[in-house]
Image (cartoon, rainbow, N blue to C red):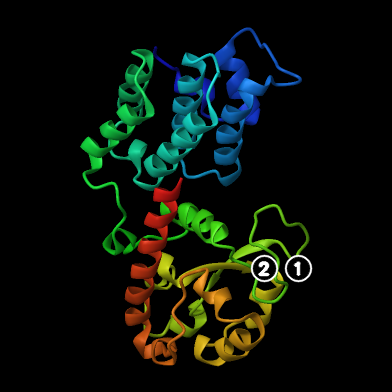
Amino acid sequence: MRVDLQRFGVLVDGPEGVIRALMGSGRTRKSPEPKFAPFTRVLVHHSKVRPDPVFGPLIVAIASYAHKRSFDLTRAEADALSAWALLANAKGRYSRGSTETILDQDLAIIRDGGSVHDLTERLRQQVGSLTISPEELEGRNQRSALFKTMFMAFRAAGAKDWKSNLSIAFDHSGVQHKLQFHHIFPKALLKSTYSSREADDIANLCFISGKTNRNISDKSPADYFPALIESAGQSAFDSQCIPTDPRLLKTENYKEFLSARRKLIATRLNDFLAAL
């Protein structure tokens, strides 16, 4: 089985378009059969998050796996497939060399009737450890696949906006509630001492609403954290792995804050992926 990436690269029709292409002849399902539901959950889940620039190949692999099984996946198998896809995305499976070559390897496993376990073992051969270390987070920013995985892990932990108490989600509408990523230490606060790259470090980013973000503006976390902790509670910060030790909230201790938060984030990501 060889898939022409050009055919799926744009994904203008979303997950349903990929399904129709794989099933051939523009065939559609107005009312998916029950056996189709687990696969639909996997595909739509990943399409909403739009993991990274290699989203297309990841979806092709997911869809091809289900197509090989006539889309007749049990809930357990669909969950395992979803977990593999999240891990492959987080580890940059298709960005570690020729995307087509790596995708062909996975499609060969699928063509030969291989299981999710076989796909996972191929990933392990490529990246070594399947756990995420704090060091892997160093130098990553909002364009990293790990940033999207971090969002999903925080959401699963019940993360909410610090003011509205709404769960973090990409589908909130309106300028007040629309989700934004927030620099815990504002870039304006850091610009005289740290580079833009250092300010955009993944460990300096969290998820809150646009309104809350604007209210915080360029304040130091040492100044705006106390009132928010009092109103939203410590759990609002714990759910996004944000240290609240006053000493770490001082600008001169920014690097130490990043290091402490990377450890918390890595633990959360590994727990999240292991629970899938």
Please state the total of marks drawn on the protein image. Answer: 2
Q: In the image shown, does 109 or 53 lie closer to the viewer?
A: 109
Q: Give left or right: position of 36 versus 101.
A: right
How many residues crowd around disc 1 within 10 Å: few (fewer than 14), some, or many (20 or more)?
some
Q: Position of residue 122 (x, y in %)?
A: 27, 31
- Residue furthest out toward the top: 25
Q: Is residue 247 above or below residue 50?
A: below
Real-space Cα distance between discs 2 and 1? 6 Å
Which residue does the numbered mark 2 point to in the structure image?
Answer: 209
Q: Are marks 2 and 1 in contact (CB under 8 Å)?
A: yes
Left or right? Give the position of 85 relative to 161: left
Helix or strand or loop: what does disc 1 sit on? loop
Say which amino acid is labelled 1. Answer: Gln
Residue beneath the point at 60% across and 81% down: 233
Q: Nearer the viewer, residue 201 or 235?
A: 235
Residue at 36% over, 26% down: 103
Tell me what residue is drawn at x 49 percent, y 36 percent.
Answer: 79
Q: Position of residue 193 (x, y in %)?
A: 37, 84
Which label number is shown at residue 224? none
Q: Hey, which quadrant is residue 200 in on the image?
A: bottom left
Out of 37 and 43, give the one closest to the viewer. Answer: 37
- Label 2: few (<14), some or many (≥20) within 10 Å? many
Labels 2 and 1: the sequence-earlier one: 1
Q: Secondary structure at mark 2?
A: strand
Instruction: Give the quadrant of the N terminus.
Output: top left
Q: Quadrant of residue 95?
A: top left
Numbered mark located on residue 176 in the image: 1
Q: Amino acid at mark 2?
A: Ser
